[in-house]
Amino acid sequence: MRAFASKCVALAAWGMCMAAFGADTYLLQPGDVLTVSVWKEPELSLDLLVRPDGGITMPLAGEIEAAGHSADEVRTVIDERLQHFVSKPVVTVIVKQTLGNQIFVIGKVTHPGPYPLNRPVDVLQALSLAGGVTPFASVNNIHVLRRDGSREVTMPFRYGDVEKGRNLQQNILLQSGDTVIVP
């Protein structure tokens, strides 16, 4: 009974983590690469790059808006459009690469640049990915720049506070396109 209860707690925690990080509902971004397979139709099975405008083009299915949608939503659209050309199509869409899902770390860090966001990453982890801050960095004046629709929002990050275990809420999870600025 104890083993069963432990497994239930572990599964519940796993489910909460998956829901919190949206792992089951990844939304496609420009730059992502999709593998589309149509069963018994090898000429319709191919890799597609999500263009900067968010679209993909597939033979017979035409133009499809992919960015901002899940792979399953794109699969449904392709399936519906192929109904006119293929009898009972069986379509699979797999996210092959998440190249469009990036964050940027700039300024006084060891390795500034873009970093793939292929798992949940917070500000402290992003600084670690960039090799840490340089000796002359203003660690208590770090900012996260995020686009929110047509405007940009700046969120402060005081490294010294987080290092001491204070104000941990500022160590936010980063979203695709966020820029961490280390002056």
Image (cartoon, rainbow, N blue to C red):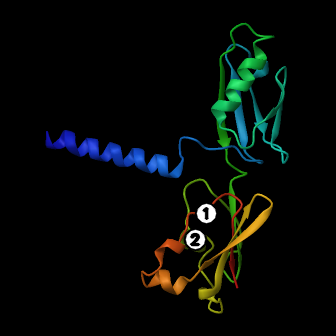
Question: On the picture, is 112 further left or further right than 158?
Answer: right
Disc ID at residue 9: none
Above or below, comparing residue 76 to residue 151 in the picture: above
- Indicate left or right for 165 with 92 as reference: left
- SS label for mark 1: loop
Q: Are marks 1 and 2 in contact (CB under 8 Å)?
A: yes
Where residue 158 sits, quadrant-wise, is: bottom right
Provide residue 16's location: percent of width, then percent of height. 41, 48
Quarter of the picture holding the N terminus: top left
**Image quarter of residue 94:** top right
Quarter holding the C terminus is bottom right
> Within the image, what quadrant is residue 128 found in?
bottom right
Would you say 24 lies left or right of 48 here? Answer: left
Q: Amino acid at mark 1?
A: Leu
Mark 2 lies on residue: 123
- Residue 17 lies left or right of residue 103; in this view the side is left
Relative to 5, is 170 above or below? Answer: below
Residue 100 percent location from the top left of the image = 73, 51
For the residue labelled by badge 2, is the local secondary structure a helix, a strand or a loop? helix
Q: Looking at the picture, tell me which residue is in the foreground, 124 or 96.
A: 124
Residue 25 x/y as whole percent: 58, 41
Q: Position of residue 168 (x, y in %)?
A: 47, 75
Q: Residue at (80%, 11%) from the top-left corner?
A: 84
Mark 2 surroundings: few (<14), some (14-19) or many (≥20) residues within 10 A: many
Identified by mark 2, the residue type is Val
* Residue at left offset 54%, top offset 57%: 120
N-terminal of the pair, mark 1 or mark 2, is: 2
Mark 1, residues whose alpha carbon is within 10 Å: few (<14), some, or many (≥20)?
many
- Disc 1: which residue: 174
